[in-house]
Structures are given as C-alpha cells and as structure tokens.
Amino acid sequence: MIARYELRCSTCNAPAQRHDLPCVACGELLEFALQADAPDAPAAREYAAMVARRRASNDPLDRSGIWRWRELLPPIPHASVVTLAEGNVPLYDVPEIAARERIAALAFLHLGMNPTGSFKDLGMTVAISAARAEGATRAICASTGNTASSMAAYAARAGMEAYALVPRGKISGAKLAQMRDYGVRVVEVEGSFDDALAELTSRSGDGAAVVNSINPYRLEGQKCTAFAILEARSWRVPDWVVVPGGNLGNSSAIGKGFREARALGLIDRLPRIAVVQAEGAAPFVELYRSGADLVPLLPHTIASAIAVGAPRSWRKARAELDASQGAAIAVSDDEIDEAKGRIGAAGIGCEPASAATLAGIVRLRAEGTIGEHDDIVAVLTGHVLKDSDASLRVADRRDADA
C-alpha cells in the first residue's frame, strides 16, 4: 500500500508547490491531501501487519514509529531522513482514574516519552528530513519551548543551523536549557508566542526552513499519533481522543490521521476528537461553540505550551471536530494543576499542558458530553521534566492540603 498525496490549500483547495508557505492564492495553510480510492480492508490489514513486523528490524527507518509508516507519508528520499527513533511511546491504562470519573476505560498515550520529551518530534523528523532533501542548511521556528528543542535536536543531527524565536520570560528554564544544549541560536521576542510567530513571518524569506506547524510536513508526522493509538489497541477505535489545544496543529494532525485510516480501510469509524484549552488561552473554544471565526486574544495561563492567543490551525481543527462530532472545552489553571497532580500520583507525570486533557475529561464527563460507557484515550504531549517549577508548585500545594 502506497498512498498518493497532493499538496493543496486546506481552505481554497488550490494546488501548491512545496516551497509555497502559506497558500499563494488565499494565504491559508497547506496540507497533503490523500488521494484515496475506495477503502480496501484486506489490503489495509496486510499493510498494518507489515508495519508491525518492521518493529523487529534494525533498519533506522523501521526503528522509528513514524517512518515505519513511510508509505503513508509524502515521499522523501531515505538518504535524507533524519530520525532519532521517535514515535515509540507507551499507552498507559489508568483504571483507577477511569473508575473515579465513572467512565468505562481511560488510557494516556504519552508523547512526552519521545526523544526530546514532546510530541513535536513526530512532526519534526518529517519537516527536517524534507528540508534536508530540498537542500536547506538552516531551520527556524517560533516556540514556547518544545518546538525549538525538537527542531534544535533534529537540525543538529542533520548538520543544519537552527534559530528559535521565543517569548521573553514566558518559557520554562528547563526548555530553554534543553534547546540551548542542542546548539540552537535563541532570539527573545517581547510579548507572547503569537508575537514570536509574527516576527518569524517577517524573517522567513531568508531561505531558512520554517518548521512550525504551518509547515504541512510537520502534520504528516504528527498524524501518525492516530496510527500509534490504533496499533496499541489492536485496531480498536476509542470513543474519544482528547488532546490539549495550543496552536492546534496537533489536534488537526491527529484528526487527519484517523480520517486517512478510515479512507484506506484500516478502520471503519472515527473517534470523536476533543480539544482542551486553558481558560486564559481559549480562543478556539470560543469560536467552536459560537460558530464564529477566530478572535485573537492575549493568552495568560500556567500551561505555557498551550499559551497561544491566535492559533494558526484553527480552521483545520474546526474541520476535524466537525468531521468527528467532537468537542472543545476550556479548563482553569487550578483544574490543570489538580489534574497534573493526579497524573503524577498515577506514576506517569507530565507537563501542565498535557494535564489539561484530564481536566477536560472531568469537565466533559460532568456536563454529560462524555458518557459512562465511553472508552477514552488522552494524549499527553510533554514530559514531566519539561517544567520542574510546575511540579514543585503542585507538590507544595498537595503537601499544604495534607
């Protein structure tokens, strides 16, 4: 099975070239659109079995949880692929939390167990590999920490220079130290992530490869999260997949992965996608519930990884929620801290943005959107060590309440 893709605008559907970013016709984001025939379930099952067998291989591409699915990715010469064996992450069942929330089943897919500690590695391996194949020698991004750390590591492996624009004083010391350890050149920008992204746009004409999630290659790698969930569950589709929402590239990518799996015959139905944002940075929740377009805001939340006031992928995310009959909900910083403590107490741990998923599940269950018979996968996007100050804050609060 080899999927065929066309690079097109996700909004106006105009065809695009690989160097176009964004769409030259309307200015919106590009995507690799699957050109699929009717679903072929037998061929799909045979392909999934072949991918599973690749786990026993010593080929560097087969050791990657992304490149094992290379027939479902845009074609990139194997010699150009930059991989750190990303994508091999655990799915943790948490029956004790499921029982407390009165739901049938809950599991955490921990993308924080990737090489640089976040889900960004899943897309970065594809974006940097594509940039390398096209002859780029520099990569650049705007970041609250995780994108820059991932870019810096993969760029270093590729022998490329890396530049990160970050909001001054708005990212954890651990993330700043990590990206600098990989050799990135850091440019601090006054304001929020959105200001850093705007500054990036003004600098992106100098030939450096932009590797934020506005780059469609990023989402191609991140869509493999859907395949990882399905493979870990023996291809049983969960009722819900719950994802934290910042710039919304990841929720868009995961929805795309499930849609492609259905189009190819790997599954016969979609899970419902739920996006969880922090109350101080919830423009998508507002637009999704109101049916209006995006109204940017100044983000304010302890969950720095999702502190985004003008998410670029909001149209894509809305389309994925519409396709899956999904939901969007906002949670408070106190709810995020409480959820982080519960995830830590389960022996798993995560950064604050990841904990928003559990906080969102609690809210969605309370309002009846999630039911008692539902089978849920929550996506944890960042490692607990990404924000040690947050862990100390939560622990101090727990000790004070003891």
Image (spheres, rainbow, N blue to C red):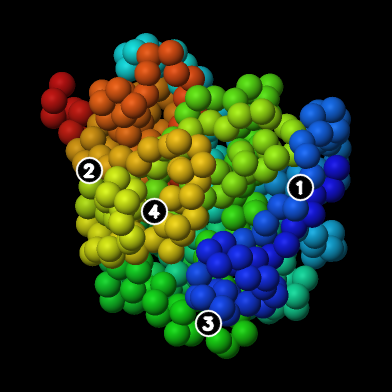
What separation in Å lies between label 3 and label 2 (alpha carbons)? Answer: 34 Å
**Residue that badge 1 annotates:** 36
Label 2 is placed on what type of residue?
Asp
Q: Quadrant of the C terminus?
A: top left
Helix, strand or loop at mark 3: helix
**Residue that badge 4 annotates:** 246
Label 1 is placed on what type of residue?
Ala
Helix, strand or loop at mark 2: helix
N-terminal-most mark, 3 or 2: 3
Residue 333: image tag: 2
**Residue that badge 3 annotates:** 204
What separation in Å lies between label 2 and label 1 (alpha carbons)? Answer: 42 Å
Location of residue 101 with respect to 142 vertically, above or below:
above
Residue at (33% x, 60% y) in the render: 293
What separation in Å lies between label 3 and label 1 (alpha carbons)? Answer: 33 Å
Name the side, left or right, on which 262 lies relative to 392.
right
N-terminal-most mark, 4 or 3: 3
Q: Residue 396: x, y in percent?
A: 20, 35
Label 4 is placed on what type of residue?
Gly
Rendered image quadrant of residue 244: top left
What separation in Å lies between label 4 and label 3 (alpha carbons)? Answer: 22 Å
